[in-house]
Amino acid sequence: MSAINVGEVYYFLRKHHSGALAESWRESSRTLLVTIEVPTTDDIWNAATLKSRFPIAYTDAFAAGLAQEV
């Protein structure tokens, strides 16, 4: 999971639910059974390229870029 997407979940929970729920997500994200990948410069360029080619959110382009690597 891209660290960008982890931050997006946090933002969404804080904005649409509560700070407490967002903080709970922040704590539990450390124990997820997935690897949180910090984007490299290449990941950023790849996400920007995907965003330019498809009608997707920029954060979704990071998820798509990681999926392409698998």
Image (spheres, rainbow, N blue to C red):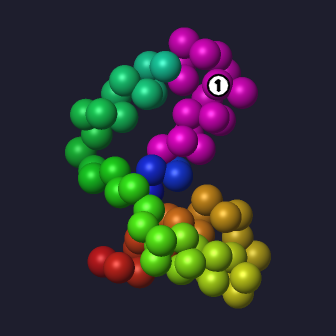
> Going 37% across and 24% down the picture, which residue do you hit?
27
> Going 42% across and 67% down the picture, which residue do you hit?
40
Query: Residue 35 placed where, x, y %?
Result: 27, 53
Number of on-image labels = 1
Magenta part mainly helix, strand or loop?
helix
Location of the N terminus (image quadrant): bottom left
Amino acid at pointer 1? Arg
Q: Let me know if residue 35 appears in the view.
A: yes
Pick the front one: 41 or 1: 41
Image-based side of 10 in relation to 43, left or right? right
Query: Residue 45 placed where, x, y %?
Result: 56, 78
Disc 1 crowd, CA 10 A, few/some/many (<14, 14-19, 20+): some
Query: Residue 68 placed where, x, y %?
Result: 41, 81
> Going 70% across and 87% down the picture, which residue do you hit?
53
Of all residues shown, which one is farthest toward the top?
A: 20
Q: Which residue is mark 1?
A: 14
Q: Let me know if residue 64 appears in the view.
A: no
> Going 56% across and 33% down the picture, which residue do you hit?
10
Q: Is residue 11 magenta?
A: yes
Pick the front one: 70 or 45: 45
Which stretch appears magenta?
Answer: 6-22
Compared with 39, 15 (above or below) is: above
> SS class of the residue under badge 1?
helix
Compared with 52, 3 (above or below) is: above
Compared with 15, 44 (above or below) is: below
Of all residues shown, which one is farthest toward the bottom?
A: 53
Image-based side of 11 in relation to 33, left or right? right
Image-based side of 31 in relation to 27, left or right? left
Compared with 12, 41 (above or below) is: below
* Quadrant in the picture for residue 25: top left
Query: Residue 70 placed where, x, y %?
Result: 30, 77
